[in-house]
Image (cartoon, helix red, strand yellow):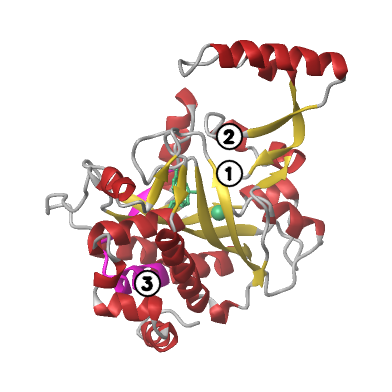
Amino acid sequence: MNMPNEQAALAVAEESAHPQQPYTGSDPTLRSRLVEAGILIETGENGLYGRSEVFEDVVERLNKVITLLGADQQAEVLRFPPAMRRHDFEDSEYLKSFPNLAGSIHAFQGNDRGHHRLLEALDRTIAVGDEERSDEWMDQQKPTRLVLTPAACYPVYPLIARRGKLAEAGAIVDVFAYCFRHEPSIDPSRMQMFRMREYIRVGSPQQVMAFRQKWIERGSMLVRLLQLPFEIDLANDPFFGRGGKIVADSQREQQLKFELLVPVATPDKPTACLSFNYHMEHFGEIWKIKQADDQLAHTACVGFGMERTTLALFRHHGLDVAQWPAPVRALLWGDAAPMIAEGLASLGTPA
Ligand code: AMP
Ligand code: ZN
């Protein structure tokens, strides 16, 4: 596969990458500084934080700017809770690729005897104090029909499939959800529960590739307006196990995933704040999503990591939002529409 748009995506990647320059800009003290300032609130578990008013304010303002950035897409706006149908999740093949990241929802579904056993186990658990506790009480828990959403776009594909054949124009959907990934870390930008804003494109390979290229350019434009240092790079997902390396290599080979990386907290490499994914007909095939001409639909999505982008802003512009650079404040706290319109007009790809 060697479509012009793929070359264009790679050209943007090459243009923005500066491998000859040493990697700088991360701040390993970011987590403790944010916690100390009360911007992120520790819960006692790595990767699970409370957010302060100021943090949430930035997330909401960023979200509004992303809406302006995609206003011409006439996307269907859908909002799902942070859980999805287990049935759809099972079909998605997520467990084939990322069994270690998935989270399922369990609940007590027993009778009085079961409740008694549950409380006895709980008493023993609590009795150990603050030491590492046993999970014995969870023997009484049973799987529900829900799992935690691993990426905001997952509930969308089966929904589109259930609606039947696509129109000629395909579909564009706008989602925003908390997602769960079991990857506890002390890196503040690697959370277990975090929000993803996504635009999803479903259609022909040409429609989907043009969409991804457009969003690589728009995402770069946004991050430039936010005055953050970044590069676009070819990437792969962290496929699990021995076979995972082969899948990851093939994903790179086919240039299916690009990321927009910003130095945040990790000292060795910058952090992916935006992702641009082309799934080819993977989801189309699983859920039998058909184009107007009966061919299997292709899909792509652009994901904005809301926490990561917000953390990058605090990292580069400081913990006091009042002191952020004037153009960044104008974008987030002022009238962003003319700035976005001007930025869009300067881009190569048509709306
Ligand atoms: P992915 O589906 O892995 O490409 O993720 C989409 C976007 O979600 C990434 O570009 C990140 O900005 C964000 N993201 C992924 N994993 C995490 C995490 N553990 N904590 C915070 N943000 C994340
Ligand atoms: Zn997605």
Q: Is residue 190 visible?
A: yes
Taking 292 as reference, is 118 above or below it?
Answer: above
Mark 1 CB in 8 Å range of ligand 1? yes
Q: Which amino acid does label 3 sit on?
A: Leu
What is the spatial separation of the Cα atoms under label 2 and label 1, in whole angstroms?
7 Å
Question: For the residue with label 2, is its CB less than 8 Å from the closest atom of ligand 1?
Answer: no
- Looking at the picture, which amino acid does disc 2 mark? Ala
Q: Which mark, residue 25?
A: none
Q: Could you tell whether 25 is left or right of 105 in the image?
A: left
Residue at image position (49%, 40%) is: 192
Per the image, the residue denoted by label 3 is 222
At horizontal 28% and vertical 51% (from top left) the residue drawn is 264
Q: Name the residue under label 2.
A: 102
- Name the disc covering residue 150, or none: 1
In the rendered image, residue 23, in percent from the top left (x then y), is placed at 16, 49
Residue 261 at what x, y percent from top left?
A: 32, 55
